[in-house]
Each structure stands twice: as structure tokens, then as C-alpha cells.
Amino acid sequence: MIRPPGHYGVVFTEASDGDQRSSDLAREKVCDVIGISSSWATVMQAHGNRVMQVDGPGMAGEADAMWTVEPGLPLAVYTADCFGVALVADEAVGVAHAGWRGVDSAVVAALFNELERAGHRPHAAAAGPGIGPCCFEVGQDVAARFEPFVDTTAWGTASVNLVAALREQVAGLKMWSADRCTRHEPNLFSHRRNATSQRLATIAWLP
């Protein structure tokens, strides 16, 4: 597990923690270690920017971000190259699932803005593992959408630095990032690497 320093209430899992989307046993083991409920609030991820407020565990519907003011309710999004992002306020917490389409549609900014409109301005942000610019090869159509953040892969083709793009969406907050690439690091799941159906989890909760 990855625990961002200074971000109590936020955890990013690794492959060694098991498939968090499909394995109840893997989820329960993670929850036992960090001391939270294994009944999580989740969403049907659609690579968009819809945000939902949730107040209880279970599937909340189709969205790519959610937030809560309920103490002890874990929120979780699942990833395997996309980024999980957590936003923390004094009395609210939110998570977002951000692949390149979600970043392009400003899903993290949408979550930030909804929290702020509800009176819960985030004071901390954290991004978990995801595909890095070293491995995120893109065509010119995608590169054109992210012009300020275009980078180069390890083999010399066009890529996008999605974490840099995400930092622009948190309105000046300092965002902690795991800075670990899912595609080439062995203890992370990557759909691009081997088309796996297994998923990491980004989990956030209010203590």
C-alpha cells in the first residue's frame, strides 16, 4: 500500500494487495490493515466528469468522482493506468477516477468545484500511480488536446504528462503524487501492459 505522507485517510493499493475491484478477500485484507470498513462507496466509472455526493456504501451510479461528509465511509475508485485522485477538506473528502479522457474533461476540477460550492474547500490533494509520460504513447489527436503537457516516451514518441495536467485542476493546491508508472513497474496493474482485468484502488475517508 501507498500512504501519502501527511494525508491520513488516503490510501493507494498496489498489485501485491490484490485485485480490489473483484476480490472480496483482497479488499478485506486491506481494510484490516488500515482499520476501515470493507463496505465502500463506489461508482460506475465512465471516463467522464460527473460528480456525485454519496452518504452510504454501495454502487452510487454512473460517475467518475464522488464526495462525502459521512465520517468513516470509504470512497473508492479503481484504476489500472488511469489515476486515482483524492481531495481532502476539513469536513469532506472526495475521490476521482482520471484517465486521459477524464483529465481532458476536467473531472478533478469538477470535484474540486463541487466541494467548494458545498462549503468544503479542499486543502490537500493526492494522486496515486498511473501511466507515466515515459510510457503513455499517444497519437497527434490526443497530444493536441494536452499541448502544454506533451512529453516524450522512453522510446522517443509523443506522450502526455497527465499528472502535470491534473495539477492544473486543483486551483493552486500542492498535489502530492506517487510518481509511479503502472505500465513498467511490476507491483502495479496495467491494462496497457497486459490487458489485465485486475484493478488497484484509491481509497479515501473522513476519520
Image (spheres, rainbow, N blue to C red):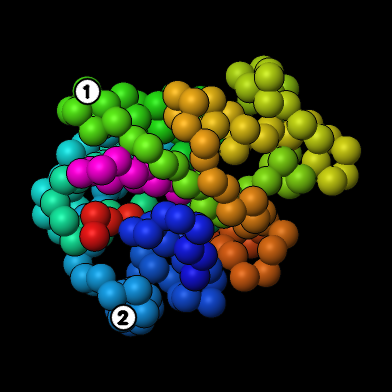
Query: Which quadrant holds residue 56?
Result: bottom left
Front in this rendered view, residue 163 or 116: 116
Determine whether the residue tagged by mark 2 lies in a helix, strand or loop: helix
Q: Amino acid at mark 2?
A: Asp
Q: Residue furthest right?
A: 156
Q: Is residue 93 magenta?
A: yes
Vertical arrangement, residue 64 with respect to residue 78, above or below: above
Q: Residue at x 68, y 18 (%)?
A: 147
Residue drawn 62% across the image and 33% down it: 164
Q: Residue 73 occupies which quadrant of the picture?
A: bottom left
In front: 92, or 20? 92
Q: Measured from the top left, where is residue 157 in percent x and y?
A: 83, 35
The x, y position of residue 165, in whole percent, is: 58, 29
| Up/down of 40 relative to 38, above or below | above
Can you give x and y, in whole percent of width and height, for residue 182 in the image? Answer: 63, 57
170 relative to 13, above or below: above
Q: Residue 84: image x %, image y %?
A: 45, 48
The range drawn in magenta is 82-97
Question: What is the number of the mark on residue 32?
Answer: 2
The disc, 2 or 1, on the residue closer to the chain's N-terminal end is: 2
For residue 63, which numbered disc appears in the image? none
Q: Kindly identify the amino acid type of the residue bearing the numbered disc 1.
A: Arg
Query: Residue at label 1?
Result: 117
Q: In the shown orientation, is residue 71 left or right of residue 196?
A: left
Few, some or many residues within 10 Å of mark 2 (<14, 14–19, 20+): few
194 to the left or right of 44: right
Left or right position of 188 against 105: right
What is the distance, in whole Å, between disc 2 and disc 1 at their CAs?
Answer: 34 Å
- Within 10 Å of disc 1 (Cα), the crowding (few <14, some 14-19, many 20+) is few
For label 1, the SS is: helix
